[in-house]
Image: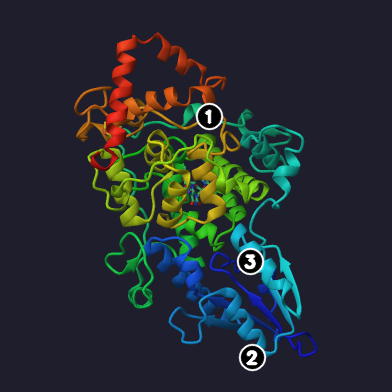
Amino acid sequence: MNSSHLPKTLRLLLGDQLNEQHSWFQIQEDNVTYVLMEVRTETDYVKHHIQKICALFLSMRSFAERMKKAGNNVHYIRLSDPKNKGGFEANLLAMIDEEGFQRFEYQLPDEYRLDKALKTFCKQLNIAFKAVDSEHFFTKRSDLPDFFHGKKNYLMEFFYRDLRKRFNILMDGQQPFGGQWNFDQENRKKLPASDIPPEPLTFHNDANTVFAEIQQAGVAYIGQIDPLELEWPIDREQSLQLLQFFIDHLLEKFGTYEDAMSMKSWSVYHSRLSFALNCKMLSPAEVIDAAVTAFNQKPESISINQVEGFVRQILGWREFMRGVYWSKMPEFAQLNFFQHDRSLPGWFWNGKTNMNCLKHSINQSLSKAYAHHIQRLMVIGNFCLLAGIHPDNVDQWYLGIYIDAFEWVEITNTRGMSQFADGGIVGSKPYVSSAAYIHKMSDYCGTCHYKKDLKTGENSCPFNSFYWHFHHEHRSLLEKNPRIGMVYKTWDKMAEEKRMDMLQQAKHYLKNLEQL
Ligand code: FAD
Ligand code: SF4
């Protein structure tokens, strides 16, 4: 299209805005240049997993190439580019100045930090500017606070039901398909010894060059990439293949084993689509559509509890968390309801602990940049909350280590759902458990150095005494919560000596976190 009469426009694309379906790309305009850049402000705001940095850069590079091939003007700034000034603002200003752009446009970022920075940047420009929607999510930033206006609490379930109706997903007229909104009682089973989940679909993306560039620039990172092949999808084709693999091989047991943990499989029946989704290589609507279509076509092999469980994660939790983020930031990032202040033990960075559940989940996080939801919530997060780790430290670790970690969905899950540092905005009670739950849902305890049934004494499982110590310490904050009252009834019924022994044991372990 000849657009010589139109203003020369610079459009910024962030690393998590790789949405080929965006209306920006539906026509090619000569007057428009897209810019993507690898900058130190992004590699360094937290220490990231090396696979996360490689995955983002490789995906951005591949996106830029595809956009170029499709006829767009694309300017790509590599980390190693001598003209790279290391931050969005400086690079943008240099381009606007040198190339005479008359207009600047960007897609609304998902992160508060970048949203603020880009607003500030635009205010100092003397050319026209505009922010447009990223066209990815089902909901707008303000939908959640609007929906709960005047209500004391946000409840995911009500928001989710409203979205099911609004977008007509798994509905039978005005009623939920299958007669229920929730099939949890059929889900969340332990993985039987006889069930071997399929080997996850992984890719062999060459990461030699990008890794060398990251190393040469001296970017600090955590975790490993070994061999120098990236298993994660880096373009739309690979993302679609991963989605198809999930539909063909995993969806049929997704709900049933959604809370199961097993040393036999690092992702069990989970989709591993979060990276592709969060970078917008896939849209949540197409992922849900693929799952619902498969359910409609093969109801004999994919039951409603599987597909509803999956839809709930994406339409429910993912949109809900984003809504909470935009309605509660920036205050959310400071919340510390329990005033926890301990540091993370050093073994969070090398997996060297005798607690088998943590050893397994942390080592997997270090080697794969991935742990599934229940490992994140009921093993690692559970430990951090019971051990009284400062939520800032927990956030930093989660934000750095996971391939899919972007603040809008990380902090709401970590500080909110997992650490209850928000005092109950995201969840109605803290997700904590003793060894009993971990044993019920996993095969970790059998070979552990610690004994799951012991509450005190040498080799007693730390989760057991921590669990009671946590409730004891925070009684004034938790006792009135109707969902927790029973815990205190049980605690009060225990013999005084047993309670004291348990608190003593927890204190001993807390003093020696590094040695656990
Ligand atoms: P599946 O189990 O296959 O689920 C399908 C999709 O549903 C996911 O890809 C994801 O997009 C969505 N989803 C599921 N649960 C949630 C949830 N609680 N919140 C938002 N979306 C959800 N998710 C992230 O994307 N980034 C994070 O940084 C992140 N940090 C987390 C930290 C903690 C402490 C906890 C408890 C959860 C966190 N989650 C995060 C949510 C969830 O654990 C991951 O989305 C999921 O493990 C990704 O793996 P998957 O794609 O195989 O998910
Ligand atoms: Fe984890 Fe305790 Fe089980 Fe060991 S015994 S795996 S520490 S829950």
Quick check: marks 3 and 2 in contact, CB under 8 Å? Answer: no
Classify mark 1: residues with Cα within 10 Å, few (<14), some (14-19) or many (20+).
Answer: some
Percent across and percent down for residue 504 are 29, 23
Q: Which residue is mark 3?
A: 117
Q: Is residue 446 left or right of residue 31?
A: left
Percent across and percent down for residue 323 are 65, 47
| Element type where label 2 sits in the image | helix
Does mark 2 have its CB less than 8 Å from ligand 1? no
Tell me which label, 1 or 2, sits earlier in the chain. 2
Q: Which residue is mark 2?
A: 98
Q: Which residue is mark 1?
A: 429
Query: Which of the two residues, 4 or 398, is positioned nearer the viewer here?
Result: 398
Query: Which of the two residues, 135 or 185, is positioned nearer the viewer here?
Result: 135
User: Quarter holding the N terminus?
Assistant: bottom right
- The quadrant in which residue 178 appears is top right
The quarter of the rendering in which ligand 2 is drawn is top left
| Element type where label 1 sits in the image | loop
Is 103 drawn above or below residue 494 in the view shown? below
Question: Going 49% across and 74% down the picture, which residue do you hit?
Answer: 38
Question: Going 45% across and 66% down the picture, which residue do you hit?
Answer: 44
Tell me which label, 3 or 2, sits earlier in the chain. 2
Q: Is residue 227 left or right of residue 221?
A: left
